[in-house]
Image (cartoon, coloured by chain):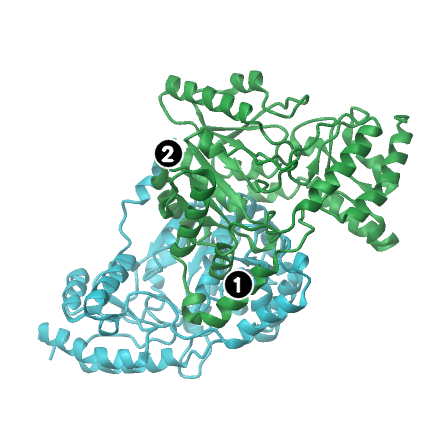
Chain colours: A cyan, B green
């Protein structure tokens, strides 16, 4: 019979999609250029033209039966080799083909990694604020998602609350840095403290606690910095990567799982991902797209617009009196609403054609997210609307 | 901790992959052209050149941020419209966009369709011989796969045995016609009898019994015939299609679920597939590949080689005294082994560099599968080896 579990999921509202839908509808009335749509995390800069060039090149020069033929379940060997070599160069860890499993984006990577390192009934801990799709990602594995309340002063890890949730059933920690929605990059200090605590608990509980590291924003870091590499600081790390944001190709659904070479059962985890994929119906991303990203592993789109936009927004928000932690990366900023009810605030913002996402979607109350992956010109035009909104709340 | 369920799956041998591996190894010794490798169902004819042309066209003429941008969860609206229109033209059923969910091939389609129309603990029935991946596909949904023994005289449905397995817990029937591995196409008579029986049981049990119709070989039918359309003969049908075989693009991982417009809860099933995909990590096939197949819905590769190969092999096998039902489609043939132990027979065949797959993998004993998606010239050269093998068993 019709499965009631999935039927009931239809009743839950997706606030982000609804706001994006509102923005489109409002755009039809007043012109989309006049809607300051900060709802969706959809890259706004084009893929490097070389991505399209390498596809043309493969279409021209490779034998079609092979080019479009079955990829082995863990991904094309030549692409896995390229990914391993690129990660090794970059993070000074001895990645090999055997540590890499090609996936349909980070969603596919997390779906497989989480099933490999946890059993139904075990717990996976994440930190608020967090990407709301973590709930179905983890629920469907049979593991239980536990959420550590946010440290709203810095949006680093709230260790006091985290410590309370750790127990013998903790199989894995799901982290996302640079973070959606806060834009915060976990400091090396935070990650080292996390690693030390997890190692201590591993000894205490007598089993590994894996970090599932969701890293789609790894390349979007500001002020000329780099995001600390989790895998280099904690051995039991399973990296989940997506090319969606770095190459602006979210529709091509391509990413990978990379088990840290020093991770317990690293190669086994990758072999298990293959077995898991037989049940998820995954069976590899597109061969052509695998080959294409394989040629662009050390490249990104021109991501500088996100830093430009962040600085404009951060300066204006602080000038207007919003409490906001300056993002270290991503294309999100996460200010505190001037009233306790962020939903009401975001509803009010619509009157000024500002589309903001209230923070309860991300497991925190009283904040809102702005996804500034839009044209800088539009960010600038939105400042007057932000000012009017602040005035409506007597902030200025 | 490492999930023991998936770890244990690693211990099961994949006979087809092992034989394909042996063929490669033997090829390295004597030249692959001298190995009569009938192991893998990998298309041997190229994709129509127009597939590559339309990709080039999209890369040239579409705005990259949109072209490679997020596809909505059920697939690109324009592609779903094209699929619905093509199915409507072809099968005279009123398909609309709302009936279509784009997937990563038939594997992805079955993973989602099965989860939508069954609950854990319910039963899904399939018919031997069957594609062995049905076991993990169904096991992972929580439903229980029940297998009807083969009718080895015709490889149509064994209704007597089927009737014994039907009960109130039967949620769905998973069928595959044209069939891998038998090559048989279910007759209209078979499907009508199946439909009548299911309707009777639906009335008796008071709930729909869905047919999940796995149709990747739909376009590969011989003697100028067409495969009867299940959805036209039984309303509660959820079609699972793949372009892998018809367009020779198995590596591009593209297909769809199409709920019959007359199916109970047709649109709900598609909406539920979207919810299910949040847990499987699926989130759409590649946008570029979706768009490309959207332009080739009424085309196929030149599939005539498969019929040519089938006729050569069928004639030779019958001449040599093999008991074999003539395939109506696909690129498989499924003769009876001259001894009860098909594994032993296929082991013997290796001595003649003939790579045959024993039938126990497909839920039947004493038969073997030949995947003749290879060059006709090689099929012809293999006949002498087949003859020697028959002689070794004193068949001639």
- Image coordinates of residue B179 in percent, x first then y, are 61, 34
Neighbourhood count class around disc 1 (C-alpha, 10 Å): few under 14, some 14–19, many 20 upward: some
Q: Residue at x 57, y 55 (%)?
A: B252
Residue B41, by quadrant, is top right
For the N terminus of chain A, give its image quadrant.
top left
Q: Please state which of residues B343 and A177 is positioned toward the viewer in this rendering.
A: B343
- Image coordinates of residue B186 in percent, x first then y, are 58, 29
- Image height check: is A145 above or below B238? below
* N-term-proximal mark, 2 vs 1: 1
Disc 2: which residue: B262
Q: Residue at x 60, y 62 (%)?
A: A262
Residue A296, by quadrant, is bottom right
- Is A177 situated left or right of B246 in this image? left
Q: Is residue B340 visible?
A: yes
- Image height check: is B294 above or below B261? below
- Image height check: is B355 above or below B327? below
Q: Which mark is residue B54?
A: 1
């Amino acid at each position: 019979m019709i499965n009631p579990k999935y039927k009931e999921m239809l009743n839950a509202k997706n606030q982000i999609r609804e706001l994006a839908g509102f923005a489109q509808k409002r755009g039809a009335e007043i012109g989309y250029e006049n809607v300051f749509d900060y709802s969706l995390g959809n890259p706004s800069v084009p893929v490097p033209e070389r991505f399209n060039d390498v596809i043309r090149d493969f279409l021209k020069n490779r034998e079609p039966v092979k080019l479009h033929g079955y990829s082995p379940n863990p991904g094309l060997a030549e692409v896995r080799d390229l990914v391993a070599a690129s990660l090794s160069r970059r993070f000074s860890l001895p990645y090999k083909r055997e540590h890499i499993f090609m996936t349909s984006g980070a969603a596919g990577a997390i779906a497989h990694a989480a099933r490999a390192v946890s059993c139904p009934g075990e717990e996976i801990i994440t930190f608020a604020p967090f990407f709301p799709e973590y709930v179905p990602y983890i629920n469907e594995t049979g593991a239980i998602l536990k959420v550590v309340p946010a440290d709203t002063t810095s949006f680093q890890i709230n260790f006091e609350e985290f410590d309370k949730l750790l127990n013998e059933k903790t199989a894995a920690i799901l982290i996302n840095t640079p973070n959606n929605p806060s834009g915060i990059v976990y400091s090396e200090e935070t990650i080292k403290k996390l690693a030390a605590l997890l190692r201590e608990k591993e000894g205490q509980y007598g089993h590994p606690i894996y970090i599932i590291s969701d890293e789609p924003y790894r390349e979007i870091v500001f002020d000329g910095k780099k995001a600390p590499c989790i895998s280099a600081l904690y051995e039991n790390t399973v990296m989940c990567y997506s090319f969606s944001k770095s190459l602006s190709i979210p529709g091509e659904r391509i990413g990978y799982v990379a088990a840290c070479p020093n991770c317990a059962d690293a190669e086994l985890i990758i072999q298990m991902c293959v077995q898991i994929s037989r049940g998820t119906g995954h069976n590899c991303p597109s061969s052509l797209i695998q080959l294409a990203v394989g040629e662009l592993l050390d490249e990104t789109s021109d991501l500088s617009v996100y830093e430009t936009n962040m600085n404009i927004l951060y300066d204006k928000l602080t000038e207007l009196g919003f409490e906001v932690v300056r993002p270290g990366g991503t294309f999100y900023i996460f200010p505190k609403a001037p009233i306790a009810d962020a939903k009401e605030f975001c509803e009010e913002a619509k009157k000024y054609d500002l589309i903001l996402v209230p923070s309860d979607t991300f497991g925190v109350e009283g904040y809102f997210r702005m996804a500034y992956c839009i044209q800088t010109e539009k960010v600038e035009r939105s400042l007057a609307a932000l000012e009017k909104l602040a005035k409506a709340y007597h902030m200025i």
